[in-house]
Image: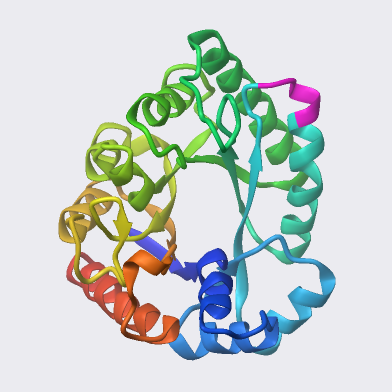
């Protein structure tokens, strides 16, 4: 296992800022990320944000974009390529795409098998374009909150897409959907290209990685056995139901300490 560094997506940070009654201030958020011990962030970085995060010694590890991957390929490409271009310019390597649900976010419907296959074809085409034009690796991020669609999205990669398409395993959403993120890493080690790490208490996000239903020691064992090489990215999220007792900065610091310990034990 070779870990490039430790990163975080920024949705949870911005939402926590709002729930604490503060206006979203990217300079303050990037400073807090650096102070918490992060090496990088996941962001679709415009020039202004890129300059800000670099003030604090942060890199861009990845960019994330949600798309109707089961739809028309031209629309998929039109949505992804501008993000890919900015990511490459920022020095990132991992383009993470999310499969927007069939039927929409308000009423996700079971994705039909023909659309699962189309999604796999679209992912294959997009992966080839992202690598050829920008030198990026494409991975599908799981976000479905139900088992049917989580497994359908998984099949779109492991059964329907070229080997160049990777998996970004989001531990929290996999658990919410009734799936086993450790099992995914064990079954598909050659596909594992990225992680979004969050613990859960049932369907409620845990405050940090140190406690919850997901066995991160078992996950670290699976990563090591898969010879994982890449970033480890946090996706901590504190909705009201989580009832956080600490700041986001402190929860990130606690989570990173645990991760670094697990990685160090397997070095």
Image coordinates for residue 8, horizontal then vertical, percent: 50, 68
| Residue at (56, 21) in percent of width and height | 120
Q: Is residue 99 left or right of residue 206?
A: right
The secondary structure making up most of the magenta span is helix
Q: Quadrant of residue 218?
A: bottom left
Residue found at the far top of this picture = 114
| Residue at (31, 75) in percent of width and height | 255
| Residue at (79, 29) in percent of width and height | 75
The span picked out in magenta is 71-75
Nearer the observer, 10 or 85: 10
In the picture, the quarter occupied by the N terminus is: bottom left
In the picture, the quarter occupied by the C terminus is: bottom left
Q: Is residue 122 left or right of residue 176?
A: right
Q: Is residue 53 left or right of residue 245?
A: right
Image coordinates for residue 254, horizontal then vertical, percent: 30, 81
Is 28 above or below relative to 220? below
Image coordinates for residue 139, horizontal then vertical, percent: 53, 41
Is 192 above or below relative to 1? above
Would you say residue 179 is visible in this rendering? yes
Would you say residue 57 is visible in this rendering? no
């Amino acid at each position: 296992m070779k870990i490039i560094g430790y990163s975080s997506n920024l949705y949870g940070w911005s939402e926590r800022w709002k729930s604490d009654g503060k206006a979203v201030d990217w300079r303050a958020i990037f400073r807090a990320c650096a102070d918490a011990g992060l090496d990088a962030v996941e962001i679709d970085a415009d020039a202004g944000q890129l300059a800000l995060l670099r003030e604090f010694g942060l890199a861009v590890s990845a960019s994330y974009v949600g798309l109707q991957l089961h739809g028309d390929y031209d629309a998929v490409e039109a949505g992804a390529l501008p993000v890919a271009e900015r990511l490459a310019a920022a020095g990132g390597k991992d383009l993470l795409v999310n499969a927007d649900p069939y039927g929409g976010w308000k009423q996700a419907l079971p994705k039909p098998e023909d659309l699962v296959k189309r999604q796999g074809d679209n992912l294959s085409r997009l992966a080839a374009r992202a690598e050829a034009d920008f030198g990026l690796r494409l991975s599908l991020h799981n976000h479905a909150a139900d088992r049917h669609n989580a497994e359908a999205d998984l099949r779109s990669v492991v059964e329907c897409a070229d080997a160049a398409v990777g998996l970004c395993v989001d531990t929290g959403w996999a658990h919410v959907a009734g799936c086993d993120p450790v099992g995914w890493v064990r079954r598909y080690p050659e596909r594992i290209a990225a992680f979004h790490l969050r613990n859960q208490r049932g369907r409620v996000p845990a405050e940090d990685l140190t406690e919850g239903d997901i066995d991160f020691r078992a996950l670290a064992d699976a990563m090591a056995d898969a010879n994982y090489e890449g970033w480890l990215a946090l996706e901590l999220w504190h909705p009201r139901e989580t009832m956080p007792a600490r700041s986001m900065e402190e929860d990130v610091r606690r989570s990173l300490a645990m991760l670094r310990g697990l990685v160090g034990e397997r070095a």
